[in-house]
Image (cartoon, rainbow, N blue to C red):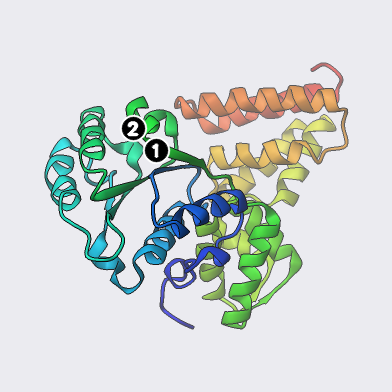
């Protein structure tokens, strides 16, 4: 088994290998082929291909000389104005070493930059447009100041769908000689929630235990509550058996070492698989959201989860 980190090993190397963002790829590819890209702003959840696409653009533009014409900074590590004034500005003002008349600076997690740093970046983007293009990546475009947004072409990335995750898993499984059950692919997708990087990391972690990837093995590695166990808890509660539901829930939390917030997420998913009226599902989902908020604010996990179970008991008795 290779000791290489799979997220780097299987990073997309060209536009055809990047999945799930077809519309964005089509537009960016046309810009790259014209050898005249504007400043770009990639916004969206983690693990959806923002950094990979930036690297593909640079390699397509500069070929073998891409390293000499590319600067990558993680803005969450270097958040201050001094980095923008010195490191970024010094790189931006120098001339490109290729036929493309500009260099490229990639600022990952740009929404972590302070407002002062963003104001300095705004002026740098304006003054050195002829010799440098910026690609900014962020989770939330609303945290980027308007003057920077107006200078960039904005591309919004979306979480990967199951068909895209299937494609990635099958490609890696074939390359690494892994045996994967269909239920395992579903478990990997649910655990990753559309985050490609998390899918690959989970796949590597499970394959280090066994080359046969089962749903049970995936659930063990992810340390998430099994849907079947959560279903039992909810069925006990809806039948009016609060004591059994409480004991089963405590058993899950202690034996599996699962946090209250993870339990809440599992319950929220399982609500929609219950054989109850749609209106009741909506009410219970609302109650789940209320309990999740209390947990985030620091309330005792088990007391709040008991409160949630009592809501299910009342719902089962028709008193919700």
Left or right: 72 as drawn, with respect to 297 = left
Cα separation between marks 2 and 1: 7 Å
| Image quadrant where residue 186 sits | bottom right
Q: Nearer the viewer, residue 44 or 130?
A: 130
x then y, percent, for residue 226: 68, 52
252 relative to 13, above or below = above
Q: Nearer the viewer, residue 257 or 47?
A: 47
Q: Nearer the viewer, residue 20 or 235?
A: 20
Left or right: 187 as drawn, with respect to 71 = right
Q: Residues within 10 Å of mark 1 (few under 14, many from 20)?
A: some
Residue under the point 48% across and 29% down: 296
Instruction: Tell me if I can see residue 256 in this picture.
Output: no
277 relative to 44, above or below = above
The residue that disc 1 covers is: 152
Mark 2 and 1 residues: CB-CB less than 8 Å, in contact? yes
Instruction: Tell me if I can see residue 250 in this picture.
Output: yes
The residue that disc 2 covers is: 148
x then y, percent, for residue 78: 21, 45
């Amino acid at each position: 088994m290779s000791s290489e980190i799979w997220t780097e090993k299987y990073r997309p190397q060209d536009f055809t290998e990047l999945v799930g963002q077809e519309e964005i790829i089509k537009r960016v590819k046309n810009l790259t082929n014209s050898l005249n890209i504007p400043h770009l702003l990639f916004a969206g959840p983690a693990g959806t291909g923002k950094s990979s696409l930036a690297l593909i653009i640079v390699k397509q533009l500069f070929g073998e000389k891409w390293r000499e014409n590319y600067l990558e900074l993680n803005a969450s590590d270097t958040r201050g104005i001094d980095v923008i004034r010195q490191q970024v500005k010094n790189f931006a003002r120098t001339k490109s070493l290729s036929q493309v008349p500009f260099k490229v600076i990639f600022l990952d997690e740009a929404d972590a930059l302070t407002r002062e740093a963003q104001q300095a970046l705004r002026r740098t983007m304006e003054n050195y447009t002829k010799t440098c293009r910026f690609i900014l990546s962020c989770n939330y475009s609303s945290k980027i100041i308007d003057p920077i947004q107006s200078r960039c072409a904005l591309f919004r990335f979306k979480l990967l769908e199951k068909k895209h995750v299937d494609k990635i898993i099958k490609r890696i499984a074939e390359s690494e000689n892994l045996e994967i059950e269909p239920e395992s692919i579903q478990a990997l997708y649910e655990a990753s929630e559309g985050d490609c990087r998390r899918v690959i990391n989970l796949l590597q972690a499970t394959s280090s235990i066994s080359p046969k990837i089962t749903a049970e093995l995936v659930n063990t590695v992810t340390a998430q509550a099994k849907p079947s166990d959560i279903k039992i808890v909810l069925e006990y509660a809806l039948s009016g058996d609060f004591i059994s539901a409480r004991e089963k829930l405590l058993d899950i939390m202690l034996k599996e070492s699962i946090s209250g917030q993870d339990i809440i997420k599992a319950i929220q998913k399982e609500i929609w698989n219950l054989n109850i009226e749609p209106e009741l599902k909506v009410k219970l989902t609302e109650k789940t959201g209320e309990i999740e908020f209390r947990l985030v604010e620091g309330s005792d996990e088990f007391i709040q989860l008991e409160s949630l179970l009592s809501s299910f008991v009342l719902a089962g008795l028709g008193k919700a």
